[in-house]
Image (cartoon, helix red, strand yellow):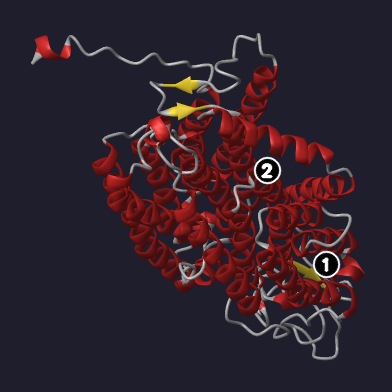
Amino acid sequence: MLVATSHIAAPHVDWTQLAPIVALGLGMIVSLVLGLLGGNTGKVLAIVAGVIGAGTAGILAMTLWNSQDDVGGSFASHHGVARVIAGSLVMDKAALAGIVIACASAIAGLAIAARGRGTDDAGHGETAALILASATGMAILAAANDLVTVFLGLELLSIPLYVLCASHVDRAASLESGLKYLILGSVGSATALMGIALIYGATGEMNIDKISQVAGQGDLRGLVVPGVALLVAGFGFKLSLAPLHQWTPDVYDGAPTAVTAFMSVGTKAAALIVTARLLIVGFGQAGTGGVASLYDYWHPLLYVLAAASIIVGNVGALGQPSMKRLLGYSSIAQAGYLIAALSVGAVTGMLAYLIAYAVSTLTVFAVVAAREVERPDLGDDIAALDGIAHDRPLLAWLGTIGMFGLAGLPLTAGFFGKIIVSGYLIQGGETWLAVLLIVGSIISLAYYVSPVLRMWRAEPAPFPGGDGAPAPEPGAVLVSAAGVPETAPAHGEPYGARRSINEPRSVLAPRAPWELGAIAVIFAVLTLVLGVWPQPLFNLANDARQAIFTLH
């Protein structure tokens, strides 16, 4: 045994290229350890360590991106595509874009979790570590160039999310959310794994760019084509594509808001990039020796999924009373727009719209989380947004920008993203799908604009006190209009039980933490900047597209 293993050469590991993934892993470990300190100190240090880890990984990814622009630089390899660990990972610009998006969504999730509902139940250290563990899986999945690595990244992404969705143990909806995501997510993973098995059995290859050389052979298509269909179905679960979307509204609604915000952006980014790499590189180009492309097989499947998702998502979002359920159905429609671009091979359009979707979505989730803090009696109900322009004008503006970005209105990044996707669809001969995208966007105005109108025109929902006074934390010291201190009622005690029925109460409503406002401001600014000046967004997406096509 020792003689046999002595001849196995270990692959070379380029730690420079792996630096973003390593930073996420280290941040995960440090967050978990610091969380063991307990008390407020442990909470703060765990979240800060998580933010530093994700931020460092994002900065390292951007550094590698800039280094690949320098053809003669030490990081450049094969036209800016660096193969790592025997080619099982590729740190090209598409992978780096996915890593940056995963890091940004992790930072947003950590900021929301810092003082969010349910984090105390799970523990701040555990929450931060699980978010970074999932972000590590997203980074690996986005960079995967091997079918085994694809599955490892998929599972590392998914398993922490199963736990995080159920982390608010005091809420039955959260436990239900975790169970549903576990069961249906496992079905999705098993489906993808079966596809991987069929493809490997037919081609004898695990490396994606080697698979492309033989996958289109006529005698192999009987296994390869079903394998590709199963792979698409498996990732369709993660992307919330109809009819594989059933878990999405319930999981989004039941999971803590920090987890929903994180998974709604990071999961889609990683799954889309690896799906594009599999279909474009592995099964979308002609192989050697006249081997045909499989594009004609997966192209119709994608546009059927895209059309179904646009219809189901936009119709399902109408009339939803919960912002998180509304955003869950919205994400189904948004996944339809993204996969529509991929169906015609428009990776540039897909990546441009992915970035626009990410910044708009994180803006809205930060506003929703802020209102959950300010109106715990309403939570994520749309009524929590009523009239916030009166006393929270900044939040109202930020929420408006985020919702308009998702709707694709002018002067937002979403508008440019939908324009470019529609253009590619028409250019690719799928004009009907471009028309459906526009019709879906028009329908979406009904549920995107409605919360905006409620922010600016509706009267604020009354507080539980029944006299317009806010519901303070139990045990808080209140000051009546007469200047007499009193104690807030305990849980279960009716408000107003400790004071005269005729005496008004003057108490400030709780204010959202500054970090939620900061997250909302940052992503709202990006939504506007990329809408007014979209050229950097297009250039970034085009560079990432070229990296994927260069891999072949």
Residue 480 image-quadrant placement: bottom right
Circle 2 packing at 10 Å, graded few (<14), some (14-19), many (20+), is many
Q: Which three-letter amino acid code belongs to the residue tagged 1?
A: Leu
Q: Quadrant of residue 10?
A: top left
In the image, farthest residue toward the front: 290
- Residue under pointer 2: 348
* Residue 48 point in image, percent of width and height: 62, 37
Q: Are marks 1 and 2 in contact (CB under 8 Å)?
A: no
**Is disc 1 placed on a helix, strand or loop?**
loop
Against 201, residue 24 (above or below) is above
Quarter placement of the N terminus: top left
Check disc 2 and give the amino acid type.
Thr
Q: Position of residue 17 (x, y in %)?
A: 53, 20
User: Would residue 76 appear left or right of 187 to someone viewing this image?
Assistant: right
- Is 388 placed left or right of 474 in the picture? right
Report which residue position mark 1 lands on. 508
The answer to whether any part of residue 167 appears in the image is no
Where residue 531 appears, as percent x and y from the top left, is: 85, 50
Q: Is residue 301 above or below residue 262?
A: below
- Can see residue 71? yes
